[in-house]
Image (spheres, rainbow, N blue to C red):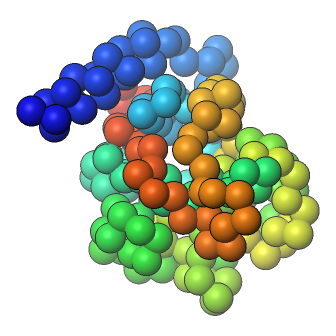
Amino acid sequence: MIRILAVIAALVCAVPALAQPLPAKLDKANAIVIDTTKGRVVIQLRPDIAPKHAERIKQLARDGYYNNVPFHRVMAGFMAQTGDGQNFNGTGGSKYPNLKAEFSNVPFTRGVVGMARAASPDSANSQFFICFADASFLNGKYTVIGNVVQGMDVVDKLKKAPAGSQSGTVTDPDKMVKVRVASDIK
């Protein structure tokens, strides 16, 4: 019964997001639309600076890999991380090989989206993060893959880890309910 109510609540929350128009002049072939438990987020990907990473994000969206994946690490004033469709906790990656870094001069500022990785610069796979604020200490160390063009207010509403949490791990996190390439939405 509780699961049925949870599904109904998720659908009720998703209806306004589904009706929301996409931004004008959006490059739909290089944008992803993320319907979350808090609303819709639209990310314009940057194939001009990170072509392999942008292609990977689109492939995983088309595979359905990101559907129902949690924002497992959310740190107030820093970033919200998601994209582990394997283990759902930040320890997994996709069936595809890791990607070679595509660093650029684009700075990490509010709304910029970057690829998460392990210690090796060439270990990005499926996980990504959205910056809540400027994070210049990441510049040149992580691959910028895009920026939020609609829905930063939604990102701001994501459930965050408790203050003082070093890991940023969220209990009962918000989720990406459905992730699609914008050009695939009919």
**Residue 36 at x, y = what percent?**
44, 35
Q: On screen, 63 above or below 182?
A: below
Instruction: Farthest residue to the bottom: give it.
Output: 120
Instruction: Tell me if residue 37 can be seen.
Output: yes
Q: On screen, 177 above or below 53?
A: above
Instruction: Tell me if residue 131 can be seen.
Output: no
Left or right relative to 46: residue 171? left
Task: Decide which of 145, 154 is in the foreground and name it.
Answer: 154
Label count reads 0
Q: Which residue is drawn at 13% across and 30% down?
A: 4
Left or right relative to 167: residue 33? left
Quadrant for the C terminus, please. top left
Task: Decide which of 176, 102 is in the foreground and name it.
Answer: 176
Q: Residue at x 35, y 38 (%)?
A: 178
Q: On screen, 70 above or below 165?
A: above
Q: Residue at x 60, y 50 (%)?
A: 160
**Residue 164 at x, y = what percent?**
73, 65
Q: In which quarter of the image is residue 129?
A: bottom right
Quadrant for the N terminus, please. top left
Task: Decide which of 89, 114 is in the foreground and name it.
Answer: 89
Q: Residue at x 82, y 68 (%)?
A: 138
Left or right relative to 182: residue 154? right
Q: On screen, 120 above or below 171?
A: below
Left or right relative to 82: residue 67? left
**Residue 184 at x, y = what percent?**
36, 31
**Residue 68 at x, y = what percent?**
32, 47
